[in-house]
Image (cartoon, grey):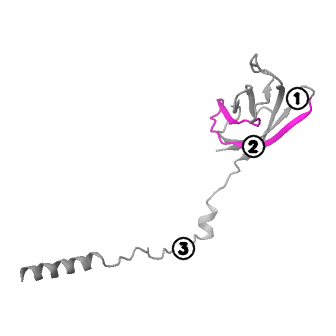
Amino acid sequence: MKIQAALSALILVASFASARQNTTRRLHVADAPQSNAENASTVYTDTIVSPEAHSVDINGYDKPLRSRREVFFVTNNVTDTVAAIAYTIKYYDTQRRMLHSASERAYIEIPPKETRQVNKKSWDPQFNFYFVRSAVPQRAEKVTPYEVTITVDTIFTR
């Protein structure tokens, strides 16, 4: 009798434990839209700035022959914090023939009057080129020197 009661209790507990649970969340109702009077108090400012001369300075570019990364420095000369820059980088051989060009965006936060380093993936994955002002290994054969120009297209400020 005790075994039968224990078995019944065990079956009863097991049936409650295995009962289906509803894990679906209830429908979320969005808040009512704000009236136009409340929206009128919100002021949006343009955070995209067309760069003027020397708003942002770029200098110190480097890419040694066997490097997978390119590095340059960006100096913020405006009174706002720079959140990102869009720039175009062009690569030339020593006869000023264009080898490659790319437009990219660097997400870097630069407070006013400060400088930050930008580190980007190299355009030369086969290590055939080196920047003219970089050190060249003595055993390097059949490698081509190149020069760059970097122009800032857009400044994104906070």
Corner quadrant of residue 142: top right
Nearer to the camera, 125 or 70: 125
**Location of residue 83 in the rendering, given as x and y in whole percent from the top left corner:** 65, 42
Name the residue furthest left: 1
Q: Earlier in the sequence, mark 2 or mark 1?
A: 1
SS at badge 3: loop
Distance of mark 3 from mark 2, alpha carbons? 40 Å
SS at badge 2: strand
Left or right: residue 149 versus residue 20 is right
Q: Which residue appears at 21% of the width and 77% of the height?
A: 13
SS at badge 1: loop
Span colored in magenta: 96-124
Q: Which residue appears at 84% of the width and 26% of the height?
A: 144
Image quadrant occupied by the C terminus: top right
Q: Which amino acid type is shown beneath numbered disc 3?
A: Ala
Q: Earlier in the sequence, mark 3 or mark 2?
A: 3
Whether residue 44 is visible? yes
Nearer to the camera, 47 or 90: 90
Q: Which residue is mark 3?
A: 32
Q: Residues within 10 Å of mark 3 (few under 14, many from 20)?
A: few
Left or right: residue 23 versus residue 152 is left
Is 20 a magenta residue? no
